[in-house]
Image (tube, rainbow, N blue to C red):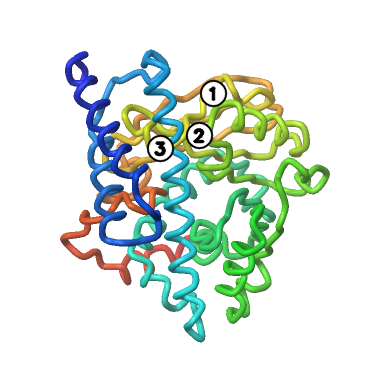
Amino acid sequence: MGSLQEHAILVEKVCEIYDKISKLETLKPSKNVDTLFTELVHTCIPPSSINISTLPNNIQEIRSKLIRLCGEAEGLLEAHFSTLLATFENPLDHLDVFPYYSNYLKLSRIEYNILNEHYPAQDGKPKRIAFVGSGPLPLTSIVLASYHLKETTFHNYDIDPLANSMASRLVLSDPDLSQRMIFHTNNIMDVTDELKEYDVVFLAALVGMDVKEKVKVVQHLAKYMAPGAILMLRSAHGARVFLYPVVDPQDLQGFEVLSIFHPDDDVINSVVISRKNSITSNIDHKHHDHQVLGIQSIMASSCKYCEFQMFGNPLNKMSMVDEMAVDD
């Protein structure tokens, strides 16, 4: 979709959906909430050459508000299912009650493969990873720890003590993850010397919901992360920028951008991988075919609503888990 008329139709549709979402009494999970966010995602998924920076200020403002509404809705969805999972004796055995668990299996595999491609072979696997903005349902950390990085310690940071309390309950009964999943209730801007201890830092898409906030966080990480440590971020491009904040490589001062993964299918987020204080600055803009990453038919996204109504043909979750179990 590339013409000005098509861009105008897209923006009009997004604004129409925003108007409906903004009038909801609550963003807690419900049929109406799910339907509206699904419509929004389906509107934004098709390839688009729209340049958000050229749009009028009022549209920019609507986009910013919409991203915050998406973030709020995701948080409520995660809290709902985290509470449900906590009712099980062994919550980790029932993660598939979360309707988008398969998404996390796939997205985490993509991110692991990208990380594995760029992490120094001589260093082996990362020993300590920080995930900033882990929330009440830290599925990225759980999936990476369970299937890909089985000896790595994950330090999960969230500013909300309730979110951390809910998240920690999920791993409490697991003898392995209860030791390797650590939760910190901190504003990441108050975390300083501890950041030097991490081989990799993941920055959640909704940490820093506008450019200024995101740049401020990145600058803080650049100041305190260890030289050579990896920073992984989620971004967006095309019409998907109405769903998530954009990470501009120029904003990653103090980091060498190693690769940018731009999906050309139903994956929502771009993935940016960078290294602290490297000398060279080659940027590898990749519109990956998922076959390159050894993944078949990817439909993953960190957007909790992105696969609503997209799983008409049930996936074989067990075969996915079995395949991942060999990724030591």
For the residue carrying disc 3, how many other residues have a C-alpha within 10 Å: few (<14), some (14-19), or many (20+)?
many
Could you tell me how far apart the alpha carbons at marks 1 and 2 are, in whole angstroms? 8 Å
The answer to whether marks 3 and 2 mark residues whose Cβ atoms lie closer than 8 Å is no
SS for callout 3: helix
Mark nearest the camera among 3 and 1 is 3
Residue 228 relative to residue 192: left or right: left
Q: Residue furthest right?
A: 193
Q: Which mark is residue 249?
A: 1
Mark 2 = which residue? Answer: 272
Disc marking residue 66: 3
Name the foreground residue: 82 vs 18: 18
Amino acid, disc 3? Leu
Picture quadrant where residue 218 is located: top right
Q: How many marks?
A: 3
First reached walking from the N terminus: tag 3 or tag 2: 3
Q: Could you tell me which residue is drawn at 56 percent across and 40 percent down?
A: 232
- Counting other residues with Cα less than 10 Å from the Cα at mark 2, is it few (<14), some (14-19), or many (20 or more)? many
User: Is residue 137 placed above or below 6 in the rendered structure?
Assistant: below
Q: Amino acid at mark 2?
A: Val
Of 133 and 70, the residue lying toward us? 70
On the image, the x and y values in percent for residue 206 come to 52, 42
Q: Earlier in the sequence, mark 3 or mark 1?
A: 3
Query: In the rendered structure, which amino acid carries the disc numbered 1?
Result: Pro
The Cα–Cα distance between marks 3 and 1, rounded to whole angstroms, is 23 Å
Residue 198 on image: x %, y %:
72, 48
Residue 12: x %, y % from top left: 24, 27
Q: Are marks 1 and 2 in contact (CB under 8 Å)?
A: yes
N-term-proximal mark, 1 vs 2: 1
Residue 104 vertical placement versus 65 (above, below): below
**Quadrant assignment for the N terminus:** top left
Residues at marks 3 and 1 touching, judged by CB atoms closer than 8 Å: no
